[in-house]
Image (cartoon, rainbow, N blue to C red):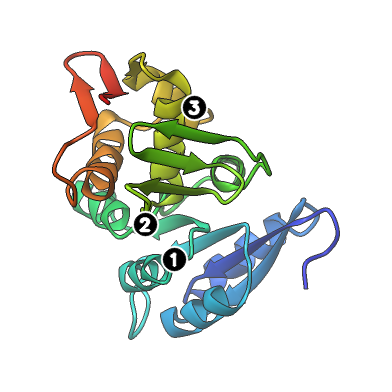
């Protein structure tokens, strides 16, 4: 059970020494941790409990972090997910984002950086309780539900894709620059453009691909806007 005033984080990590260092560092913080040593345990906990953030190691026994992330997203669980990887490779990063992760941290990592990433993910994926709806063409974004629709069909968006679509709705019909999106989503540690392009690709797969008319327009050398 979550302590009053604290954010609840699920750590899924099979290396006990890494988990112990993380638990020691955050002992007196505003974050409270649950722990799972395997992908299967992590999937079970994340399916049954409501977390503010999930820290998910890539290399886990039996069920790896990519598979856990994919299963959680397929169930509609939109909790922010940070992937931990021991390999600083583009393929690992893109694999995690493709499965629905919101951010990634490379081992060995700085604990202060991990803390900043956790808080950034929680800020951009937590509901704000607004009742405002945006209706732009056949696109609807309901902030109270934290859900987007097109032609009344719910879109299965990751928290980061939802945030990008929200920015596009707020600025419509104006263009939202890539720099603005990066600053809004990753204020503490902006990533390179590859991560943003991957999230835009995921957003298009939900917002445009199943429908006849695309609405997410790329403005060359500038950014993106809704074209309705």
**The C terminus - image quarter:** top left
* Residue placed under numbered mark 3 in the picture: 184
**Where is residue 109 shown, x and y percent of the image?**
48, 49
Residue located at (53% from left, 58% from top): 79
**Where is residue 149 shown, x and y percent of the image?**
39, 48
Q: Nearer the viewer, residue 11 or 124?
A: 124
Where is 16 relative to 89, above or below?
Answer: below
**Tag shown at residue 156:** 2
**Mark 3 or mark 2, earlier in chain:** 2
Left or right, 119 with respect to 54, comes to: right
Left or right, 1 with respect to 194, comes to: right
Are discs 3 and 2 less than 8 Å apart at CB?
Answer: no
Are discs 2 and 1 less than 8 Å apart at CB?
Answer: yes
**Mark 3 or mark 1, earlier in chain:** 1
Q: CA distance from mark 2 to mark 1?
A: 7 Å
* Residue placed under numbered mark 1 in the picture: 76
* Quadrant hosting residue 222: top left
Q: Residue furthest right?
A: 4
Q: Nearer the viewer, residue 27 or 140?
A: 140
Nearer to us: label 3 or label 1: 1
Callout 1: few (<14), some (14-19), or many (20+) C-alpha neighbours within 10 Å? few
Residue 123 visible in this rendered orientation of the protein: yes
């Amino acid at each position: 059970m979550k302590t009053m005033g604290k954010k609840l984080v699920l750590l899924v990590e099979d290396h006990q020494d890494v988990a112990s260092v993380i638990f020691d560092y955050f002992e007196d913080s505003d974050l409270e941790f649950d722990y799972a040593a395997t992908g299967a345990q992590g999937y079970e906990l994340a399916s049954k409990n409501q977390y503010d953030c999930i820290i998910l190691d890539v290399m886990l026994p039996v069920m790896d972090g990519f598979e856990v992330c994919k299963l959680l997203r397929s169930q509609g669980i939109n909790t922010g997910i940070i992937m931990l990887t021991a390999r600083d490779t583009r393929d690992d990063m893109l694999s995690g984002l493709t499965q629905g992760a919101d951010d990634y941290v490379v081992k060995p990592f700085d604990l202060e950086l991990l803390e900043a990433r956790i808080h950034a993910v929680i800020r951009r994926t937590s509901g704000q309780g607004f009742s405002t709806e945006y209706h732009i063409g056949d696109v609807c974004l309901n902030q109270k539900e934290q859900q987007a629709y097109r032609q009344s069909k719910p879109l299965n968006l990751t928290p980061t894709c939802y945030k990008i679509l929200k920015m596009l709705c707020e600025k419509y019909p104006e263009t939202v620059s890539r720099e603005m999106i990066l600053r809004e989503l990753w204020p503490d540690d902006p990533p390179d453009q590859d991560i943003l392009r991957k999230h835009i690709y995921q957003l298009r797969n939900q917002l445009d691909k199943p429908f006849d008319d695309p609405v997410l327009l790329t403005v060359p050398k500038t950014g993106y806007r809704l074209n309705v």
